Image (cartoon, rainbow, N blue to C red):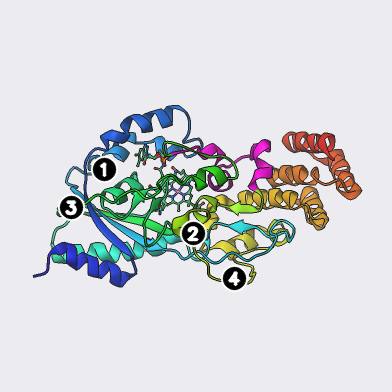
Amino acid sequence: MRPLAKQLESIALEQGFILIGFAALRRLDERAEFFSRWLAEGRAAEMGWLAKSPEKRLDPRLIDPRLRSAIMLAWPYAPPRIPEIDWCAEMRGRIAAYALGPDYHETVKARATAVAKELATARPGSVTRVYVDTGPVFEREWAADARLGWFGRNTNLLNRYHGSYFFLAEILTDAEFDAPAEPYREHCGTCRRCLDLCPTGALADGYMLEPRLCISYLTIEHRGPIPRAMRPRLGAWIFGCDVCQEVCPWNADDAAATPVNEELAPSLAALLALDDDGFRRRFAKSAIRRTKRRGLLRNAAIALGNSGNPAAIAPLTRALASEPEPLVRAHAAWALGRFAASDAHAALERARAREPNPSVLAEISLALERAP
Ligand code: B12
């Protein structure tokens, strides 16, 4: 009989996972103080679920006292070679690589569940809980314990051969496995590219990411208006951000750039014109659903404002005049305020005369005051 770990490894590889490892569950004592300070400082922001059961997050055995181990799995998502275009000038929006293609929560969970079934067959009566992103679990911590890689300075889990473009999934179980012999060495060394090149300065020493500054948080998790000072820094990013991964030497790749296509580099004007049905149809199977239509259109309006291309004035004017969501109208007003052209100014003046929503009106007045 092959040992259980070997059996699970071959089924995981067959399923398409690139890494598997085993960690003995324990309380992450060494993170308790950091996490309670992190929460007290309000860094969870609108991600209230992170604050919900901090003790469970530190010790998954509180989810179910029978649990003993985490089987950690890594699923690759190949980042496309980014088209070599001037994203702003061409009025195209950037989407983080993880969100291209079908929503990983479902696809990866199905594969991890197949591995969990194998475990239950080999070891009848096994307790198994499968999570991909959604459980109260510090996934990168257990992946590091299971020697899938090291906790990078950009706060992603990094592997020498696979970089960081992979998702983590886990099976929490009552089965027990031998602890890995050697710790996975840290390989960031003195490199600080992610800290230095983050467009918003969201990363700091000490494995500290400030979500409220992170473009990924702002474009995906944050629901209301994006703080004005942050808007220009979003550049062309409209869903997530990969800068801290792109600049990481462990993700280096010199393959040729991919030609532009609508999935990878969607036209911002077309996004801003999507109605409810259009949004649902286009993103039905995509992780992009998470922002809802109004979040994505808010982001597209900002990117159009950042484009510097006067061709953005027409779609922004249409949105300011007829978009039903005040959040989107407000950001369209901000974006129009970035253009010196007289038609942008005229569109703002017209909207001021008939806008019913006070927060959009405030945004219009500010845009008119600040117009270049
Ligand atoms: C909330 C969340 C976010 C938030 C907050 C990010 C964050 N770093 O916490 C936002 C929306 C910003 C986000 C963005 C992204 N995310 Co995210 N996110 C999560 C989620 C759901 C929870 C993470 C969490 O617990 N945060 C809580 C805080 C406290 O974590 P933290 O600030 O990193 O703090 C840790 C470190 O500081 C560490 N620490 C403290 N002191 C010390 C000292 C030492 C020596 C060490 C080693 C560590 C250490 O302890 C803390 C706890 O681990 C996980 C899935 C999961 N359940 O784990 C995915 C997850 C981390 N995200 C993932 C991805 C892919 C991303 C993005 C790349 C998506 C994108 N392209 O836009 C970006 C990357 C941004 C970044 N640099 O982190 C993947 C990462 C895969 C990998 N290879 O690491 C995960 C694991 C999801 C998955 N199942 O694959 N994410």
Q: Is residue 238 above or below residue 43?
A: below
Identified by mark 3, the residue type is Ala
**Residue position marked by numbered label 3 in the rendering:** 181
**Residue position marked by numbered label 2 in the rendering:** 98
Question: In the image, is residue 230 part of the stretch drawn in magenta?
Answer: yes
- Upstream in sequence: badge 3 or badge 1: 1
Residue 135 seen by the camera:
no
**Residue position marked by numbered label 1 in the rendering:** 60
Q: Which residues are magenta?
A: 208-234
- Secondary structure, mark 4, is loop
Question: Residue 78: horizontal and vertical position, in percent?
Answer: 47, 66
Which mark, residue 258? 4
Q: Nearer the viewer, mark 4 or mark 3?
A: 3
Q: Is residue 209 above or below residue 79?
A: above
- Is residue 325 rendered to the left or right of residue 372? left
Question: Where is residue 360, by image quadrant?
Answer: top right
- Upstream in sequence: badge 1 or badge 2: 1
